[in-house]
């Protein structure tokens, strides 16, 4: 929950503004530049429950075998925003997460949902779990 | 005054200005409207002041359509009628319910919501429901906020809950009224008419111990409920034109029931303040999720609302009176949050952090996080073949019993499916959690436990034209000058609101109308 709580605080307390003048806040914001980290690292920062992501991801892949590659899933998640999963922004992971959050919200708003085990999920979140599942297969 | 019909002189004739048949919510409401007036009212009640098995058995009948409740437990046949046991859930119909909807065959009332609103306000007092306010903006309670749902497809709608027992609350008032003569243990048997069947001349009445008497009145009001109203009209088949009011073979048709369906589970991704939906606000109003009128038009769906019940309270529901929540009991315990549910909760908690705004910070809450069943009360589309008909079997009074052929189908199924999806969109888009659809039972194509909500409606539907209904906009039977029907049987469509408040509103309106008719006529 570490990252998300910080992202939330950034949003509601205006830490982003403080970052221009206070070293501590600047440190928070700089440490999350995702373009320097591999995809799997970004995913593990986003999804904090590996087992849960795998369960949902595996179920999704079972229902959608045609999406069973990292490349396909990345394309599907990115959609027209080809840099969604590799965005370089001032706020690093916070902004990346917010962009994905926005996309998830947009999925729901436009009815881009999928059912996994009877649960209505945004297509993006189900695919993120599927991507996680492929990046971190359960070998044990 | 109360009179035991069994002690009335055999073959006596009772004269009245208004004869009301049935002392349930409708009959008692109308009678009260005449207290203190110069009109003599004869109020007939089949039962006494308490439950009586012999009288209740007169309700026996059969179900020949989709599964439905046994007819002798569906309603109560004594003073106060089914208000002796009802849940008290009340809200007016919505404006959209009154209009013609191209996607709902036979829809459209000859009234608008605005025509009924003044009577809803008066009905609110009768039902002891407090201030007439159903808007979120009015008297909003900061400690019981509505969920900040995304978009305008799903809204929080409000209902009230106060099970006023008309038989107890209004008993003394009715009893002490000089001009209200209430005949207990007195069963309406058949209407007799003039040769043209254009005026009811008298009503034949019988008691279970064999006594017979008749009531002559200037106006007759049938107020025995959505099934018995039909039964009495169809049993009155001695007229030259067949059964009374049935020139166009419409009496008993379009039987409607609200569908009670536990259709989905709402799993919040974070603790939400749910007081409005569970305990209600300080004004006694409860929240539920409903499609906006615009969403109903766009999706071409029926009206519906979904009340929320914590899954953790499931075991306590056995003690709850039959009604909205009874369908929950039909579910297996594993039909709430399945194996994947806990994983969905974790993932949505992660990802909803990315969309959630300051809502939770503003409404600091100590609410315990629950999963919630979404229990729908859904409109039943009017269906020509969904109907109440007479059986060949007769009861102890010689009246033919009834059979109910209840139907629902594709329109209701579509509404369930779309409603689940719309709620999933609204809560998902707002970062408030996820929704799981309750799987169907594999046979019927419906979730387990789909059942009626104990509301019988539509069987003497209201219409402008005689060819399209049984009563006119004033609840007068088409073609008969002095016979009126009150109750949910006159609803052309039923919306998703429990019917009693509308029954009471229409009854008050009818009383006003009859006063006017009798004064001028």
Image (tube, coloured by chain):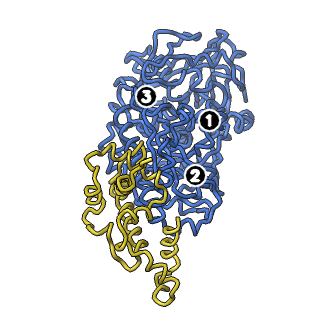
Graded by Cα atoms within 10 Å as few (under 14), some (14 to 19) or many (20 or more), the crowding at tag 3 reads some
At 70% from the left and 15% from the top, the residue drawn is: B6
Of residue B490 and residue B86, the one placed in the foreground of this image is: B86
| Residue A75, x across and y down, in percent | 26, 60
Is the same chain shared between marks 2 and 1?
Answer: yes
Q: Are marks 2 and 1 in contact (CB under 8 Å)?
A: no
Question: In the rendered image, which residue does mark 1 sit on?
Answer: B86
Q: Chain of mark 3?
A: B
| Residue B289, x across and y down, in percent | 49, 50
Question: In the rendered image, which residue does mark 2 sit on?
Answer: B277
Location of residue B106 by image quarter: top left
B100 up-or-down from B4: above or below: below
Graded by Cα atoms within 10 Å as few (under 14), some (14 to 19) or many (20 or more), the crowding at tag 1 reads some
Lower sequence index among marks 2 and 1: 1
Of residue A70 and residue B433, the one placed in the foreground of this image is: A70
Q: Are marks 2 and 3 in contact (CB under 8 Å)?
A: no
Q: Secondary structure at mark 3?
A: loop
Q: CA distance from mark 2 to mark 1?
A: 20 Å
Residue B293 visible in the picture: no
Lower sequence index among marks 2 and 3: 2
Q: Which chain is yellow?
A: A
| Residue B177, x across and y down, in percent | 72, 36
Question: In the rendered image, which residue does mark 3 sit on?
Answer: B480
At 68% from the left and 41% from the top, the residue drawn is: B36
Chain B's shade in the image? blue
At 54% from the left and 55% from the top, the residue drawn is: B134
Of residue B303 and residue B449, the one placed in the foreground of this image is: B449
Q: CA distance from mark 2 to mark 3?
A: 46 Å
| Residue A28, x across and y down, in percent | 49, 78
Residue B460 visible in the picture: yes
Q: Chain of mark 2?
A: B
């Amino acid at each position: 929950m570490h990252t998300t709580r910080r992202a939330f605080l950034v949003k509601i307390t205006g830490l982003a503004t403080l970052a221009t003048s206070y070293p501590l806040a600047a440190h928070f914001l700089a440490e999350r530049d995702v373009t320097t980290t591999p995809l799997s690292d970004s995913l593990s920062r986003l999804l904090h429950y590996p087992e849960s992501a795998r369960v949902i991801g595996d179920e999704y892949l079972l229902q959608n075998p045609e999406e069973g590659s990292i490349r396909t899933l990345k394309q599907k998640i990115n959609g027209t925003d080809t840099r969604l999963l590799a965005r370089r922004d001032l706020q690093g992971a916070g902004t990346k997460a917010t962009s994905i959050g926005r996309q998830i919200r947009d999925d729901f708003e436009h009815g881009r949902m999928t059912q996994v085990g009877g649960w209505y999920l945004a297509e993006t979140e189900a695919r993120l779990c599927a991507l996680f599942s492929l990046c971190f297969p359960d070998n044990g | 005054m109360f009179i035991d019909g069994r002690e009335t002189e055999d073959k006596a004739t009772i004269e009245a200005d208004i004869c009301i048949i049935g002392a349930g919510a409708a009959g008692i409401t109308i009678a009260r409207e005449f207290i203190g007036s110069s009109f003599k009212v004869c109020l007939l009640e089949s039962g006494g002041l308490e439950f009586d098995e012999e009288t209740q058995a007169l309700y026996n009948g059969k179900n020949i359509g989709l599964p439905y409740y046994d007819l002798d437990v569906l309603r109560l046949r004594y003073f106060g009628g089914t208000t002796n046991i009802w849940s008290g859930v009340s809200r007016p119909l919505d404006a959209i319910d009154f209009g013609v909807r191209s996607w709902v065959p036979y829809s459209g009332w000859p009234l608008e919501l605005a025509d009924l609103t003044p009577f809803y306000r008066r009905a609110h007092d009768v039902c002891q429901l407090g201030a007439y306010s159903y808007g979120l903006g009015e008297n909003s309670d900061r400690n019981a906020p509505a969920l900040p749902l995304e978009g305008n497809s799903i809204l929080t709608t409000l209902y009230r809950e106060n099970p006023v027992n008309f038989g107890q609350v209004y008993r003394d008032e009715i009893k002490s009224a000089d001009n209200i003569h209430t005949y207990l243990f007195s069963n309406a048997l058949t209407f007799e008419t003039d040769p043209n069947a254009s005026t009811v001349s008298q009503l034949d009445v019988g008691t279970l111990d064999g006594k017979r008497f008749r009531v002559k009145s200037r106006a007759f009001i049938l107020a025995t409920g959505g099934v018995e109203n039909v039964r009495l009209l169809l049993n009155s088949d001695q007229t030259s034109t067949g059964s009374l009011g049935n020139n166009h073979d419409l009496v008993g048709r379009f039987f409607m029931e609200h569908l009670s369906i536990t259709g989905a589970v709402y799993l919040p991704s974070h603790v939400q303040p749910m007081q409005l939906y569970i305990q209600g606000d300080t004004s006694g109003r409860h929240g539920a999720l409903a499609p906006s009128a615009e969403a109903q038009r766009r999706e071409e769906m029926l009206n519906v609302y979904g009340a929320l019940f914590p899954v953790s309270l499931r075991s306590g529901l056995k003690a709850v009176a039959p009604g909205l929540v009874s369908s929950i009991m039909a579910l297996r315990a594993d039909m709430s949050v399945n194996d994947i549910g806990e994983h969905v909760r974790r993932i949505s908690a992660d990802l909803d952090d990315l969309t959630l705004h300051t809502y939770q910070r503003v409404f600091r809450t100590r609410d315990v996080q629950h999963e919630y069943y979404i229990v729908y009360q859904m409109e039943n589309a009017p269906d020509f073949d969904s109907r109440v008909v007479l059986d060949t079997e007769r009861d102890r009074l010689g009246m033919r019993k009834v059979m109910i052929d209840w139907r629902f189908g594709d329109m209701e199924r579509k509404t369930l499916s779309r409603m689940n999806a719309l709620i999933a969109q609204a809560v998902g888009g707002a970062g408030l959690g996820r929704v799981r659809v309750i799987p169907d039972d594999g046979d019927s194509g419906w979730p387990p436990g789909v059942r009626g909500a104990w509301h019988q409606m539509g069987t003497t539907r209201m219409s402008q034209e005689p060819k399209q209904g049984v009563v006119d906009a004033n609840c007068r039977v088409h073609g008969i000058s002095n016979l009126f029907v009150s109750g949910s049987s006159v609803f052309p469509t039923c919306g998703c609101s429990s019917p009693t408040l509308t029954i009471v509103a229409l009854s008050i309106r009818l009383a006003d109308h009859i006063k006017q008719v009798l004064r001028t006529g």
